[in-house]
Amino acid sequence: MIPLYSNSQIRALDSFAINQLQTSGIVLMENAALGISQAILSKFPSVRSVGIICGKGNNGGDGFAVARHLSNAGLNVKVIYLGDHFSMSEDCRTNFEICQNLAQQRSNLELIQFSSIKQLKNFKYRELIIDAILGSGFSGTLKEPISLIVDELNSINAIKVAIDVPTGLNADTGYGDIIFKSDLTITLGEFKKGLFVCKGYENCGEIILCEIGVGRDFFDSEFTNTFLFEPEDAYQFLPKRGKRINKYSAGKVLTIAGSFQYPGAAVLTAGSTLHSGTGASVLVIPQSVKKFIHKKITELVVQSYGNDDCKFLTPEDYKALESKIKWADVIALGPGIGREEQTIEFVQKFIKKKDFKAAVIDADALFALKDILSKADLRKSILTPHLGEFSNLVNLPVEEIEKNIFEIGSEFAKQYKTILVLKGAPTVTFTSIGEIIINSSGNNGLAKFGSGDVLTGMIAGFYSQSKNLKEAALLSVYIHGLTADLLLGTKTEFGIVATDLIKNIPSTINFIKRSFEKQ
């Protein structure tokens, strides 16, 4: 997993470099600018004209230094800068003055002091625009004229590159209002956690790291609880299957999902357990939909409850299911069961009795959980809400959760000693000991009915084999997203549906194995 850091830790890196390594700030800025320039020239070799907008702080200083390097490489560079040299930070002023002197000697470098939004028309025909306004120190809401500048830059049809952090984005939380929308973010020193979630995920584009010339010594001793999940992690978390495995030792899953109104949810959830490697998968559904289920998946063992008029779960059904609940390694509970009062009572009874070894709690079961949350024992559970469901659980608006996603998600998982898989773009997993893991796969083709049901079944399926809650959650989320990514070539994000995900889970697992196993 790739460690992700906070703003305060990045500032501490600068202090370490300057005070302990005796490296001057201007040297760090030059190292950064050289790396940024090389990355731009490598990524966009055909670009010949560049517009750079520079602020008054060190992010602006990076921008001036980058302007010099790109001008040296023969590109036509136009810089618009905010304020004047008296208001600039010392290192920013140094690079501004160098650029100013160079601009008097060459025709491919021009500096313009900002005075009006109309000046941004100078960037209208630039092939590439670089944001060097604020960087990583920003929090809060952009004010004019910077908010107007960012809006105008976003409207220009050009390749967009942000230095360190897009202007307007909080690098700690991933939140912001008006944000520079970049195609490439070249972040300095180390990866910041806010780049990968919420508005960061939406606005940063591709994210690459630029070293500033001080090595890894500082971060080797720095603690972080936030990580980005990598493909190698998925390979390591794949369950190990012995040669003498049988269908019961390969995992026993009981899926309690579906109802007369939502029979498809049961098929998707239980079907994905099988394609994730579970040996023995049993689905319990109302008697009224049993025939429908048998037509959909022949490999499932289907147990029904109630009579032909039964359409949803009731507390009385618990007794009929009790032996199977105790039998299973894990229960997949919730998709499509509905929100009838009696069904809510069944879920609450299930949680209170604690007869299960482990459970993946999703969808309608999360709705039922809310009223008993304060007393529920969730230590053996994985909760998989999307933002709306989580908002209902914690009684907070979605926007407030997004503004403080790391803090709110982590506190919830620690308080209830559970694994929280907060589904979204991207999905973030929180553990009971305070770890935060951001998923690195997936695309907007997953925004379809049934996608979450498949994930619930996958988590149950992988847990039934590994018996590790954290690993099952992380592996499932990654493979779920990667399956959608691999389908883009044939289905596109418009055509991916939940059954496509189920059918292609095995090929995604094979893709991961072939990527890392010795040939």
Image: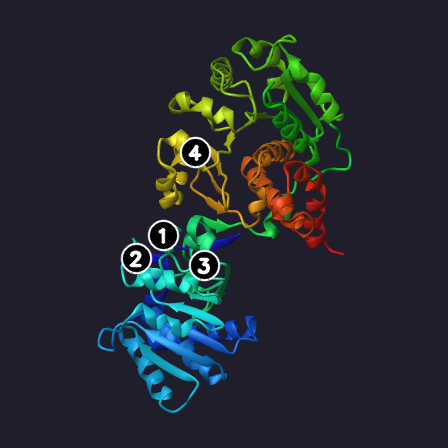
Question: Separation of disc 2 and disc 3 at Cα?
Answer: 23 Å
Question: Separation of disc 3 and disc 4 at Cα?
Answer: 27 Å
Q: Is residue 162 visible?
A: yes
Question: Which mark sits nearer the N-terminus, 3 or 4?
Answer: 3
Secondary-structure class at tag 1: loop
**In x, y percent, where is residue 440?**
54, 50
Considering only vertical position in the picture, is 12 above or below 425? below
Quarter location, residue 90: bottom left
Residue at x 53%, y 21% (from the top left corner): 338
**Would you say 293 lies left or right of 189 here?**
right
Question: Separation of disc 3 and disc 1 at Cα?
Answer: 18 Å
**In x, y percent, where is residue 160?**
47, 66
Q: Residues within 10 Å of mark 2 (few under 14, many from 20)?
A: some
Considering only vertical position in the picture, is 151 above or below 440? below
Question: Separation of disc 1 and disc 2 at Cα?
Answer: 9 Å
Q: Nearer the viewer, mark 3 or mark 4?
A: 4
Cβ–Cβ below 8 Å for labels 1 and 2? Answer: yes
**In x, y percent, where is residue 396?**
35, 34
The residue at which mark 2 appears reads as 142
Residue at x 45%, y 49% (from the top left corner): 197
Secondary-structure class at tag 3: loop
The residue at which mark 3 appears reads as 191
Q: Could you say which is closer to the camera, residue 201 or residue 181? A: 181
Quarter location, residue 480: top right
The residue at which mark 4 appears reads as 390
**Would you say 347 lies left or right of 297 here?**
left
